[in-house]
Amino acid sequence: MASFTVLVPQTGINSEEVA
């Protein structure tokens, strides 16, 4: 999911990928 979170900033907040 970390891969798709990069495209979706909204979900990035929930994912550690936001960092």
Image (spheres, grey):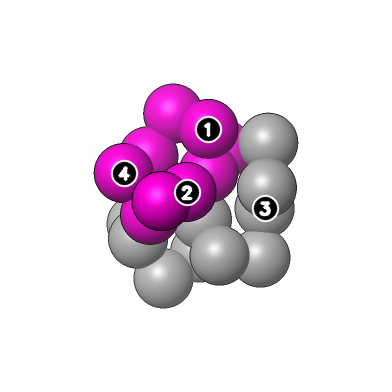
Q: Who comes first in sequence, dot 1 or dot 2?
A: 1
Q: State the SS at label 2.
A: helix
Point out which mark residue 8 bears. Answer: 3
**Range of magenta residues:** 11-19
| Amino acid type for the residue under numbered disc 4 | Glu
Residue picked out by circle 1: 13
Left or right? Give the position of 7 relative to 18.
Answer: right
- Packing grade of label 2 (10 A; few <14, some 14-19, many >=20) is some
Q: Which residue is located at x 47 percent, y 48 percent?
A: 18
User: Marks 3 and 1, how far apart in space?
Assistant: 9 Å
User: Marks 3 and 4, how far apart in space?
Assistant: 13 Å
Q: Do residues under tags 1 and 2 come within 8 Å of each other at their CB atoms? A: yes
Q: State the SS at label 1.
A: loop
Q: Quadrant of residue 11?
A: top right
Q: Which residue is located at x 68 percent, y 36 percent?
A: 10
Q: State the SS at label 4.
A: helix
Q: Do residues under tags 4 and 2 come within 8 Å of each other at their CB atoms? A: yes
Residue picked out by circle 4: 16
Q: State the SS at label 3.
A: loop
Left or right? Give the position of 2 relative to 14.
Answer: left
Point out which mark residue 18 bears. Answer: 2
x then y, percent, for residue 9:
68, 47
Residue, far bottom: 3
Q: In which quarter of the image is residue 6?
A: bottom right
x then y, percent, for residue 17:
38, 54
